């Protein structure tokens, strides 16, 4: 009696194949909706933007409207937000970027600072100090912290050069 209610194996396979298939998002106005959120504040809240370039752990990545849904870990680097009025640049230290199927991009970052807040001289000085700690007889904890600082300062130096 219940055999008629059970789906056949071919229907289950077909349904699961369709459920896992990646598709483009449906877009009404052709704009990407960006939310950029920090632990202590929101910088963008579903704002329409043209493109966002992120420093993904797997490599730099440009995200436009209709992008395939994905989740990307962020490494320290330059976050570029291209709007119709111009480009805004932020330095992010870490976080995650999620491209949703409904044409929205959510970036949860630990920190994000506008690039105008950094001077090349201060970055060079910070990098030199961190490298000095790495090459010294400092404790392992100090060296571990210095390795993180070197990674961040090198990424910041690269971002300032762009």
Image (spheres, rainbow, N blue to C red):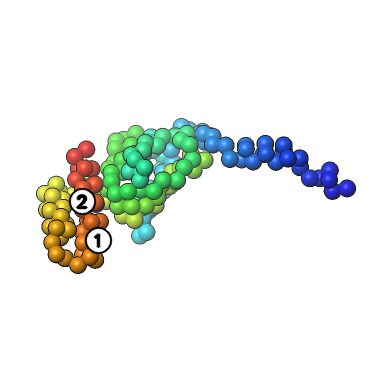
Residues packed near mark 2 inside 10 Å, few (<14), some (14 to 19) or many (20 plus):
many
Q: Answer yes or no: do the residues labelled 1 and 2 have beta carbons within 8 Å?
A: no
Tell me the mark number nearer the camera, choosing from 1 and 2: 1
What is the number of callouts on the image? 2
Please give the residue where the numbered disc 1 appears in the rendered image: 144
As displayed, is residue 114 above or below residue 49?
A: below
Residue positioned 21% across, 59% down in the render: 146
Q: Which mark is residue 153?
A: 2
Residue positioned 33% across, 37% down in the render: 82
Residue 117 seen anywhere in this rendered image of the structure = no
Q: Earlier in the sequence, mark 1 or mark 2?
A: 1
Image coords of residue 105 (percent x, y)? 43, 43
How far apart marks 1 and 2 lie (CA) works out to 14 Å
Left or right of 91, for residue 2: right
Image coords of residue 140 (percent x, y)? 22, 65
Residue positioned 52% across, 40% down in the render: 101
Image coords of residue 68 (percent x, y)? 48, 36
Mark 1 residue element: helix
Left or right of 112, for residue 47: right
Residue 40 seen anywhere in this rendered image of the structure = yes
Left or right of 117, for residue 69: right
Pick the front one: 17 or 32: 17
Q: Residue furthest front?
A: 137
| Rendered-image quadrant of the C terminus | top left
Q: Residue furthest right?
A: 1
Pick the front one: 67 or 154: 154
Image coords of residue 21 (percent x, y)? 57, 37
Mark 2 residue element: helix
Left or right of 21, for residue 149: left
């Amino acid at each position: 009696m219940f055999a008629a209610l059970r789906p056949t194996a071919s229907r289950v396979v077909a349904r699961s194949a369709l459920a896992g298939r990646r598709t483009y998002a449906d877009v009404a106005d052709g704009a990407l909706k960006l939310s950029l959120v920090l632990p202590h504040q929101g910088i963008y809240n579903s704002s329409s933007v043209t493109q966002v370039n992120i420093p993904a752990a797997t490599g730099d990545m440009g995200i436009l409207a209709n992008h395939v849904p994905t989740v990307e870990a962020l490494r320290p680097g330059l976050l570029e937000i291209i709007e119709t009025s111009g480009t805004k640049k932020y330095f992010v230290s870490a976080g995650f970027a999620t491209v949703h199927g409904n044409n929205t991009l959510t970036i949860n970052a630990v920190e994000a600072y506008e690039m105008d807040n950094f001077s090349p001289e201060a970055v060079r000085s910070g990098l030199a100090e961190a490298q000095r700690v790495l090459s010294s007889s400092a404790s392992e904890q100090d060296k571990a912290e210095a390795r993180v600082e070197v990674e961040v300062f090198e990424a910041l130096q690269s971002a300032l050069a762009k």
